[in-house]
Image (tube, rainbow, N blue to C red):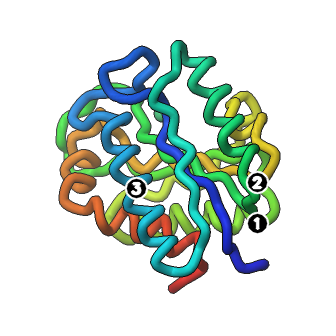
Amino acid sequence: MPKITKVTVHAGHNKNGKIACGASDYIDESKEARIICKKVIRLLKRNGVKAYNCTVNNGTSQSDVLKKICRKCNARDRQLDISIHFNAADHSRADGKTKGVEALLYKNDGIKAEIAKRMCEQISRIGFTNRGIKVRTDLSVLKNTTKPAILIEVCFVDDQDDAKLYKANKDAVAKAIAKAILNAA
Ligand SMILES: [Zn+2]
């Protein structure tokens, strides 16, 4: 696998409180995705990777946010685009089981599949259930970016166990994502 030396990272959706700002329950997707995005970029830079933050905070609609994110990513010289999200399904109480992490890819192949697999594995080591890779051909950031792209759904905002585990492990989550990109053990 080629060494990753330049990437873009962005937090999904608009900024919290604006239109198209993502899922919110025990934790808030837009807010937490921005926290993790910044932490990941800091870790990558510390390891010599050129990491560009392509987060969009001024979208006028869901489609405008997506369009602007893709435009920002495609304007950069990079090998990989990383999109940070949090999942939502149905509100669930604490039952001692986490719903977990998953990575979405346009196609399950190549460097993005290798890195996505490692991302899920690294995050699952913190205690999140590994839901693995899912192929999604309908998502703008996967479809309309011109380099391999990974959309990581860290955990579920509406699962009480996921939210609790996440809140206690924000640094570890960021580290897990950075490690997967750096191919570190
Ligand atoms: Zn999302």
Residue at point 32%, 64% (across, down) = 127
Q: Is mark 3 within 8 Å of ligand 1?
A: no
Q: Amino acid at mark 2?
A: Pro
Looking at the rendered image, the disc whose residue lies closer to the viewer, 1 or 3, is 3
Residue furthest to the bottom in view is 185
Mark 1–mark 2 CB contact (< 8 Å): yes
Indicate the quadrant where residue 69 lies.
top right
| Residues at marks 1 and 2, CA–CA distance in whole angstroms | 7 Å
Question: Which amino acid, mark 1?
Answer: Ile
Number of the front mark, 2 or 3: 3
Drawn side of residue 56 relative to residue 100, left or right: right
In the image, 106 versus 64, the foreground residue is: 64
Res 124 visible: no
**Which secondary structure, mark 3?**
helix
Residue 104 % position (x, y):
63, 45
- First reached walking from the N terminus: tag 1 or tag 3: 3
Q: Residue at x 70, y 68 (%)?
A: 114
Q: Which residue has dot 2 on it?
A: 148
Going from N to C along the chain, the mark reached first, 2 or 3, is 3
Q: Which residue is mark 1?
A: 111
Q: Is residue 37 above or below residue 120?
A: above
Secondary structure of the residue carrying tag 2 is loop
Q: Is residue 33 left or right of residue 110?
A: left
Please tell me the numbered disc located at residue 149.
none
Left or right of residue 16: residue 143: right
Name the residue beneath numbered marker 3: 38
The location of residue 94, given as percent across then percent down, is 18, 42
State which quadrant residue 126 falls in.
bottom left
Quarter-of-image position of residue 118: bottom right
